[in-house]
Image (cartoon, rainbow, N blue to C red):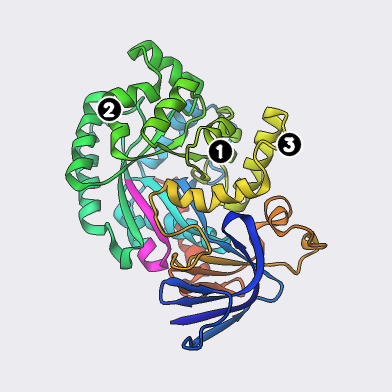
Amino acid sequence: MNILIKDVNAILPEGVVKQTDIGVKDDKIAFIGDVPADFTADKIISGKDKLATPGFVNAHTHVSMTLLRSYADDMQLMDWLENKIWPIEAKMKKEDIYWGAMLGIAEMLKGGTTTFADMYGDMEQVAQACIDSDIRAVLSRGMIGAAPNGMQALEENKELFRDFNNANDGKITVMFGPHAPYTCPPDFLRKVIAASEEYNAEIHIHLAETKGEVENCLKEYGKTPIALMEEVGILNRGVLAAHCVHVTDEDIAIMKKHNVRVAHNPGSNMKLASGVAPVPKMLAAGLCVGLGTDGASSNNNLDMLEEINLATLLHKVHNLDPLAVPAFKGVQMGTEYGAEAVGLKDAGLIKEGYKADIVLFDLNEPQCCPRHDLISLLAYSMNSSMADTVLVDGKVLVENKQFTTIDEEKIKYKANRCTKNLLNR
């Protein structure tokens, strides 16, 4: 389908905002500006009083954890994991994973997120939810190598790759997902490396999230988690590293050497009191830093515009520097850098030839008046409920704040029913 978005204020590369027309042909942005004589629109969308942004990229989450939203809050990370989250996750069935994923996808799409990177169990259910909703996704089977089912999980990740990599017209990419160094010993990680080499796949892993994790790693191996991963060989495989809160200057140099891409999760890190990642240092070193929400049980939403806002504010106050992460840098982290972080080459920008993953935000709200600086408004004033129209791969999935392909009420009903059954098991 050819789509013409007329007279829209668009955030273009390098932070340029321009009132223009955007043409979409099939899954790509065909042009920006004057409409070519040979372009005939099958659908015209008015961009009047709208702001066009690239679709947000949620670079790290556990989408099916929506069923555990508000289930266990205000706890220490390991207490939260070991005594609340892991025990109830062990009771989850495939139906729970599917409807939890559908609920999270609905939340993300409605808020302008067009791509997410996910790590969990029963990932074929998440993949099916992605196909049914048409969202773009980077999926990995979460693996705890120290658990009895560690090798089974690795085999399931291989199967996930065989069945779903490049599925749904290329909208699904599969990575390998070892959970973290403290749950996956070096011997297991070497097996993951071998599998990633066999399938030519990259790796999604949690690294250096808490002080305790780093201290224990130093005590056991005499190295930081980053240095240990370099020694084991993980960093040679192309890595999306979630968190990276407690990293040294030496760690950052190692990450730059291996082009490690970071998924910064400010909301989750703040809520779990994990600490503040040295994001300005990482950016200054030339690292790619995207943004993620983490799971809905540690955030407690999947709102990427909120993460952009938190990322811009947190590093200002932490560094006592109002220039630490400016508005446009935060927007880049949620779009362009996020796309690079999850391994996408042609997404994250409103640019000719790029994927038509576009969000139109409604500017007819009091917090958008006056309009001195639209990028500043997006980062500091607006909220995700103002997302009016969402395109993924050139397909309109949300229009006038309503879904065009999925049934929101059915999803909420099914998710609530799954949660009730889960708690009664």
Q: Which residues are magenta?
A: 130-140
> Residue 272 at what x, y percent from top left?
56, 32
Residue at the location (27% across, 27% down)?
A: 146
Say what amino acid the circle numbered 3 marks. Pro
Residue at the location (30% across, 44% down)?
A: 202
- Residue nearer the viewer, 217 or 132: 217
- Whether residue 394 is situated above or below residue 241 in the rendered picture: below
Residue denoted by label 3: 322
Residue denoted by label 2: 146
Q: CA distance from mark 1 to mark 3?
A: 22 Å
Of callouts 2 and 3, which one flags the residue occurring earlier in the amino acid sequence? 2
Residue at the location (40% across, 14% down)?
A: 218
Say what amino acid the circle numbered 1 marks. Ser
Of callouts 2 and 1, which one flags the residue occurring earlier in the amino acid sequence? 2
- Label number found at residue 268: 1
Of callouts 1 and 3, which one flags the residue occurring earlier in the amino acid sequence? 1
Q: Are marks 1 and 3 in contact (CB under 8 Å)?
A: no
Q: Residues within 10 Å of mark 1 (few under 14, many from 20)?
A: many
